Every structure is written in C-alpha cells, then in structure tokens.
Image (cartoon, rainbow, N blue to C red):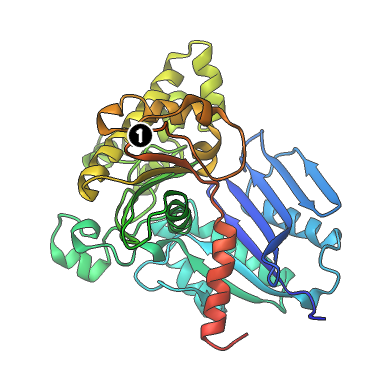
Amino acid sequence: MKSKEYALIINCGSSSIKLRLIDINEEISVATGLIERIGSSACRQYVEWTGGFTEENHQFNNHQDSLTWSLNHLQAADVIHDPSNLILVCHRIVHGGERFSNPVIVTDDILNELRTLNRLAPLHNPQNVVGMKIARNIFPNATHVAVFDTAFYRRLPPAAYRYAIPEWIYRDLGVRRYGFHGISHQYMMLQASELTGKSLSEGRFITLHLGNGCSISAIRNGQCVDTSMGMTPLEGLIMGTRCGDLDPTIPLILMHETGMSLAEAENLLNTESGLKGICGENDMRAIHRLSEIGDSNAKLALEMFVTRIKKYIGSYIAILNGADAIVFSGGIGEYDKITRELICNSLDYLGINLDPASNSIDTHTARVISAGGSKILLLVVPTDEEMQIAKQSLGMLERTGIT
C-alpha cells in the first residue's frame, strides 16, 4: 500500500491567509485553515480537519503571528501522523516580475531575489516572503515551491502590457503591465470552458476576481489578452483599500501640495484608499449594512465599485468582439448576490440577463446564474487557487525529475 503523501498550500493575501493540506494521490483536501481581516479587531481564524475544528476570534496584527498560529495548530492536531509524509509546501507569490514566469524551488537565493520585488506588490510580496520563511523553519524537510500569480499573463500582447511612455523605461526598468490573480483567473477559465461547453481554443471569457483585491481579465482562445491590474496590483478596479485607476498626477500633487513623502503617498494609495477611502470600510459586508441604513458614503462606495466594473466589462466585450461568459469569483464575486445583481443590471443591451432566483442560491458550487436566452452566460465559480497551486508545483517537480 502506497504511503500517504501530502502537500501544504500557503496562500497569503493582503489581509488574509488561506491554508490547504491536500492528499496528493487522492487529490482531496484533508485540512483547511483561514485567517481573515488581519490587523482588524474583527480578525477571525480557524483550522479544520477530519474530525476536528478549532476557531478563535482575536486580533492578529501581522501575517507572521497569524501564520505561526495556523501552522502550530495544524501540527498540534496531528493531522500528518508521519512528518516525512509532508513532501511539498507550495507558496502563492503575487509578483514574479520579469524574472519568474514558472514555479521554482524556494532557496535562500530565491528568497533574496523575491525581496527585491517587494516594491512592486507592497501589500503582498513581503507577506509571501514571510510565509516562506516561517514554513521553511517549521517544515525543513519538505520541498518548498513558489508559484507566481503573474505567470498567467506572460503571453499578454504588447498592445496590452506596454504603457504609453518612452520605450527605454520598459527596456531598462521593466515598467510594464504584469497582471495579478492569475492563478484564480486561470482556474475560472478552465471552469468556464466546462460550464459553457466552449473549448479553450474557441472560448471568450471575462473573469472577475472580486475580494479585498479585485481584478478582471479578458481571455480568448485560452490566453489572457488584457487584464486590469498593471505593473503592481494597484491599478484597475476599486478595491478594499487600493484606489485602482487614478490620474497619475494625483500622487505628484499630494507630494507637492502637502509635503507627503513618496512612501507616504504609496501607503495612502495602497492601504487608505479604495472602498475604505470612500466610506471608512473595506469589507463589503459592512458596506452593505451601512448602505441599508442610509449611509451616503457607503452607498457611494458601492456605486463607484459597481460602475468601475461595468466600464471594464464593456471595454473587454469590445476587445473580445463579444463574450461567451462572464465569471464571478473571490469573496465578493462568489458570496455577494447584491453586488452581482448591481453589476449585471442595465447590461441587457448586451444580451446579459441575470436570473434572480439562480443568483440568490447560496451554495459553494460552480453554477450558471443567467436567465434562459441570455446571449452571454453569467457564471459563479468558487475559485480553487490552492489546488491549482499544488498541481503547478507537482507538474514542475515531475518535469525536473525531482519526484
């Protein structure tokens, strides 16, 4: 009988950490963990495994304390009876820059290279590096692999990834559109192909990852042709604390008129803007509650959030010359029926028609929520970044002959 082999996937987001322990041979989850709203008084954390569950509600102010708590609880639960059975630890890394386009085995040299990319994704990459450092200390005998969110976008056409600035800035400094949430968008693409019956070679999909970080991608023939996030995850849709698209002179004005430093301006746009900047809340659940009791700033935040998404949907339908499906995923995209309805309203001129009953179903399964006769299907797909990360890591190890 073949011994058990496990992979642990660590997915550090800007305000959350997801953990998944997978039985590699069976391709099933045996334990999960989640810490959300890190740094907030509403921080929540749990670890769940077959036959056990632990949950706590206390504030973790940083990813290091949060991740250490989770990994220690996984060990204490004795989920993996023989530590040698944990053969792989996979890490989602947001920004790979020009250097990283495929999974790599984590070494000290790789960690040092990744630290140089922190400036490109200041809310994520530093936390990703922290996660790798902690996990390597706790699980020193496992192979640690980094998988990059930006890899899905490496075949973007130049018209999409270049900015309208002098060529030397791209050539010498690497200033270009990289795109993010690529693991999630790739998973949505694969699920959309199954749900619509459209092969990857013919499908046209618009995929929406909506959470504390938000992005939208246009996919044609199995390849992303445009995406909303840019050189960093700051560009594009309005997000929990990130401003999204912005007149580039605004940070210059802030620095000139207020004496704000470059670091202060960067921090403001990344951590104090977006939904939080408009209404003081970055959690869409809280924004809905405030909106329902008449808070004008919360209503404005929701309207601005939806309007920006509609603008991108319209532009991507033009780029794709139509679409077979629009796919919703992420915490907001999967669970927030009100926001989905607001996004889909007034798009009937494009042949987009939401079915209210299907949209209201509360289930953690991939499904169609468009009405019969809708020219463009509307889909909800619970993203499974962790399984995608594991498969990419295992594929890399098999190709290199390590396993």
Does residue 145 show up?
A: yes
Depth order, front residue of 400/13: 400
Rendered residue at 20%/56% (across/down): 163
Above or below residue 209? Residue 72 is: below
Count neighbours of disc 1 (C-alpha within 10 A) and say few if under 14, some if 14 to 19, many if 20 or more.
some
Above or below residue 309? Residue 104 is: below
Above or below residue 145? Residue 350 is: above
Q: How far from the left and from the top, in percent, is residue 190? A: 45, 58
Q: Specify the quadrant of the image occupied by residue 179.
A: bottom left
Which residue was labeled with disc 1? 374
Rendered residue at 35%/34% (across/down): 374
Element type where label 1 sits in the image? loop
Depth order, front residue of 57/323: 323
Q: How far from the left and from the top, in percent, is residue 326? A: 38, 42
Above or below residue 330? Residue 1 is: below
Left or right? Give the position of 167 relative to 312: left
Q: In which quarter of the image is the N terminus?
A: bottom right
Q: How far from the left and from the top, in percent, is residue 46? A: 74, 46
Rendered residue at 63%/63% (across/down): 9
Rendered residue at 58%/55% (across/down): 12
